Image (cartoon, rainbow, N blue to C red):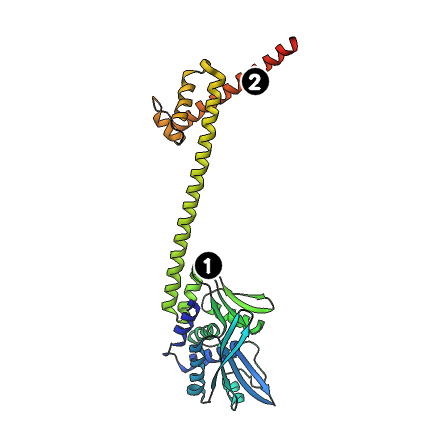
Amino acid sequence: MALVDDVKNELAAIENETAAAKKAQAATMIRFGGGLHLIKRHIVVEAQFSNLAAAKWLQKTIQEVYGHEADLIEVARQTPTGDLTRFSVRVIRSGGALALQSGLLDRRKRPVRGLPAEVVSGNIAQIKSAWRGAFLAHGDLSDPGKSSYLEIVCPGSEAALALVGAARRLGITAKARQVRSSERVTLRDPDVIERMLILMGAITTAREWSGKRSDGETRGKANRLANFDDANMRRSAKAAVEASEKVINAFEILGDEVPENLRAAGQLRLDHRDASLEELGRLADPPVTKDAIAGRIRRLFQLAKKVESARAKEAAKNSQAA
């Protein structure tokens, strides 16, 4: 089971809410899960969910809080990625009455495009319930270890803006954006996501998500450091091999003309090919700094290059004279 389903199961199991909070959650679930349909001049309320516990919560609340019978129907359909199962909550006979009671129809009996006014202007418990309902209806949560996000697909821009405003009342900054012609409200910061999960009531899964995310970040950091160390070791080994080849070449060019301090530094490089410059400095007699040993090896190379260049010029000069 995906962690997002764990979150929804935990949210759907919350029972100790006030009637006002339950109404705010139910109205938001209907608004974000589907909404109102007009069939033969008769209003039908229908909301569809991917999570069975969420659908059962709404069915029970419609019956106990609003006093209307609601049908729960399992809907299966085929998609390019496989079979898809949804759970639909429908109120047919008293759909119009429920729409008015839940605030999804205003006083002039026009459909509300955002969220009901009593939800938007409600107390903090109602605001939390609204976010809970939106997540139960159409929320998604990234798996730990991946790029963090908590996202809700909204039925329209007005509903998205209402959800952003509700988040602001909770002290959280959410962003509305359009993705492939759908309106979405997204949280990206991991700490903000954890806080929102707790505010909605998913305390257990919030801690689980945060814990797994922290473990993933720790493993990722360790892997990056290991890869970094491996890369450094490979670069150091390659540089040591190249330096040793240059020392051998310098000794061949200079022969007995190598100054003793430069010869000693070059010989250390040949005798300890895997050692760092700092280690070579400690092995020198007397010990010197890594900058000093590096300078001596560099001067050895420069001297060999200078002598080789002078010999080449002399050979060219002799060739022309002949």
- Residue at image position (50%, 85%) is 90
How far is the residue under mark 1 from the one under mark 2? 58 Å
How packed mark 1 is, by other alpha carbons closer than 10 Å (few <14, some 14-19, many 20 or more), is few
Q: Which residue is situated farthest in the top direction here?
A: 322
User: Residue 129 placed where, x, y %?
Assistant: 44, 75
Residue 84 in view in this figure: yes
Q: Work out which quarter of the rendered image holds the N terminus and state it.
A: bottom left
Say which amino acid is labelled 2. Answer: Ser
- Residue at image position (40%, 22%) is 267
Q: Secondary structure at mark 2?
A: helix
User: Residue 9 placed where, x, y %?
Assistant: 40, 74
Mark 2 and mark 1 in contact (Cβ < 8 Å)? no
- Residue at image position (51%, 90%) is 94
Residue 167: mark? none
Residue that mark 1 sits on: 146
274 or 31: nearer the eye? 274
Q: Work out which quarter of the rendered image holds the C terminus and state it.
A: top right
125 or 311: nearer the eye? 311
Of badges 1 and 2, the one in the foreground is 2
User: Residue 302 placed where, x, y %?
Assistant: 51, 21
- Tally the marks: 2
Q: Is residue 140 above or below residue 23?
A: above
Residue 299 in view in this figure: no
Q: Secondary structure at mark 1?
A: loop
Which circle's residue, 1 or 2, is located before the other in the chain?
1
Say which amino acid is labelled 1. Answer: Lys
- Residue at image position (48%, 63%) is 149
User: Residue 5 placed where, x, y %?
Assistant: 43, 71
Residue that mark 2 sits on: 309
Q: Is residue 64 above or below residue 305?
A: below
How packed mark 2 is, by other alpha carbons closer than 10 Å (few <14, some 14-19, many 20 or more), is few
87 or 201: nearer the eye? 87
